[in-house]
């Protein structure tokens, strides 16, 4: 690869204790990056970072418990560390919650991103990998969606992600020193193959895979399948599920390529293949070695029939191709559930994180 600048080596990971962020920390540590984490633990727990270090066999450089909207605290992190690039996961992510609390979503997701941008700007940091979402496409389907699909965000969560994209694109247009890679993930799922890291949101999970795990473990009686009257092959909604390990590999590749070309680069992340809710249920039952009970329920408000990625652009750009299948996602999510029946609660304590 022809590059003039060195590959960024110290990476600030916002939301590094979360589902995707924690797996990304392992991936970055495994590939020689120094990792600094900021997180307010609003949807995670500090113990996860002990597990990240256990898997990677290396320490996270520093961990700060702070809210990314706290400009002074964030600025102090940039004062203390020579950050080369930022991977920005920290956000609120539930569509249904965003319908109830739109102001919180705009404040955290958009306000948090502009607060981060300001701190980066003031400290001469111009490289960012941003977590976006297939949610920005709204009701654009059916058929594989590529990045030229016109976004039509249909709820405050999706709109907040789209607004962030617009802010970042505009900054890149006006300031040539910025490079931003914006990754629109479809449906990340699964867990680290060690069984030490997985998806452990606070409260009842919204997403299909963690719910399936809870039902299979007997914590919930049955899975409610939201809608069996969609115009799909079996009547249930189709999504493009992507293993979290493949997802975070793409982030590491994004960092490796941040010095290739300035400006804003937008890529979809998905398998390019959809699975219906009943197909995921069957795959999970197979992985768990037990039948997962379910009942048909009405459509969930705001759901669309089908969302599948055309992710060929990122393959062309960096050669990234997902290696893991739906069966792998189910196997790993089930392993995490079995080994951590109460999630991270009560597990290995991490010393109280530093505060700015
Ligand atoms: P997550 O909730 O597990 O992780 C987000 C992390 O950010 C959590 O640790 C949370 O405590 C932290 N956080 C939230 N608000 C914060 C704040 N104000 N200050 C500091 N930390 C804060 O979510 P995830 O699934 O890991 O998602 C990571 C990112 O990917 C999010 O931006 C999300 O919108 C995006 N995304 C997720 C999915 C998905 O299905 N999981 C799909 C597409 C996009
Ligand atoms: C998948 C399918 C449900 C739970 C969400 C966000 C999206 C992105 C990914 C962040 C749907 C069905 C679910 C259940 C069910 N996240 N389902 N019973 O809604 O595709 O996408 O996560 O950016 O923005 O909207 O994911 O896992 O919630 O649902 O039948 O108990 O499973 O209706 O068809 P979704 P999901």
Image (tube, rainbow, N blue to C red):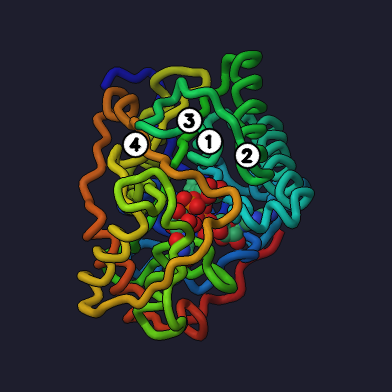
Query: What label does residue 253 carry, if any?
Result: 4
Mark 4 or 2 closer to N-term?
2
Residue 112, image x, y percentages: 70, 45
Mark 4 or 3 closer to N-term?
3
- Report whether 34 appears left or right of 339: right
As drawn, 122 above or below 3: below
| Element at label 3 | strand
Residue 55, image x, y percentages: 32, 66
Q: Which residue is mark 3?
A: 181
Is there CB contact under 8 Å for labels 4 and 3?
no
Q: Nearer the viewer, residue 303 or 44?
A: 303
Is disc 4 surrounded by few (<14), some (14 to 19) or many (20+) residues within 10 Å? some
Query: What label does residue 84 carry, if any?
Result: none
Q: Quadrant of ligand 1?
A: bottom right
Q: Nearer the viewer, residue 285 or 70?
A: 285
Is there CB contact under 8 Å for labels 2 and 1?
yes
- Report whether 18 appears left or right of 33: right
Is there CB contact under 8 Å for labels 2 and 3?
no
Q: Comparing marks 4 and 1, which lies closer to the viewer?
A: 1
Residue 84, image x, y percentages: 51, 36
Query: What label does residue 154 carry, if any?
Result: 2
Mark 1 or 3 closer to N-term?
1
How far apart are the two marked residues, 4 and 2, measured between alpha carbons?
30 Å
As drawn, 90 above or below 346: above
Q: Comparing marks 1 and 3, which lies closer to the viewer?
A: 1
How far apart are the two marked residues, 4 and 1, measured between alpha carbons?
29 Å
Would you say the beta carbon of the disc 2 residue lies within 8 angstroms of ligand 2?
A: no
How far apart are the two marked residues, 2 and 1, measured between alpha carbons?
7 Å
């Amino acid at each position: 690869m022809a590059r003039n600048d060195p590959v960024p080596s110290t990476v600030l990971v916002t939301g590094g204790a979360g589902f995707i962020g924690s797996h990304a920390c392992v991936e970055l540590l495994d590939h020689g990056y120094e990792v600094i984490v900021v997180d307010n633990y609003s949807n995670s727990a500090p113990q996860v970072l002990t597990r990240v270090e256990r898997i990677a066999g290396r320490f996270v450089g520093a961990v700060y418990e702070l809210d990314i909207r706290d400009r002074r605290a964030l600025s102090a992190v940039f004062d203390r560390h020579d950050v080369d690039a930022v991977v920005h996961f920290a956000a609120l992510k539930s569509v249904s919650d965003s319908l109830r609390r739109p102001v919180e979503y705009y404040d955290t997701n958009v306000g948090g991103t502009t607060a981060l941008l300001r701190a980066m700007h003031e400290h001469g940091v111009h490289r960012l990998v941003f977590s976006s979402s297939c949610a920005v496409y709204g009701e654009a389907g059916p058929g594989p969606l590529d990045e030229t699909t016109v976004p039509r965000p249909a709820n405050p969560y999706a709109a907040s992600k789209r607004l962030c994209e617009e802010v970042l694109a505009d900054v890149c247009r006006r300031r040539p020193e910025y490079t931003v890679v914006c990754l629109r993930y479809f449906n990340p799922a699964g867990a680290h193959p060690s069984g030490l890291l997985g998806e452990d949101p606070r409260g009842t999970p919204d997403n299909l895979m963690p719910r399936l795990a809870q039902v299979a473990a007997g914590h919930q009686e049955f899975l409610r399948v939201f809608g069996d009257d969609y115009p799909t092959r079996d009547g249930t909604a189709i999504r493009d599920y992507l293993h979290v390990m493949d997802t975070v590999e793409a982030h590491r590749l994004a960092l490796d390529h941040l010095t290739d070309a300035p400006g804003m680069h937008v890529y979809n992340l998905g398998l390019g293949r959809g699975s219906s809710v009943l197909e995921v249920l069957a795959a999970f039952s197979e992985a768990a070695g037990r039948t997962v009970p379910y009942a048909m329920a009405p459509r969930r408000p705001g759901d669309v029939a089908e969302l599948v990625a055309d992710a060929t652009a990122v393959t062309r750009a960096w050669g990234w191709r997902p290696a893991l299948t739906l069966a792998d996602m189910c196997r790993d999510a089930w392993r995490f559930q079995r080994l951590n029946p109460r999630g991270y609660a009560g597990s290995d304590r991490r010393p109280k994180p530093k505060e700015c």
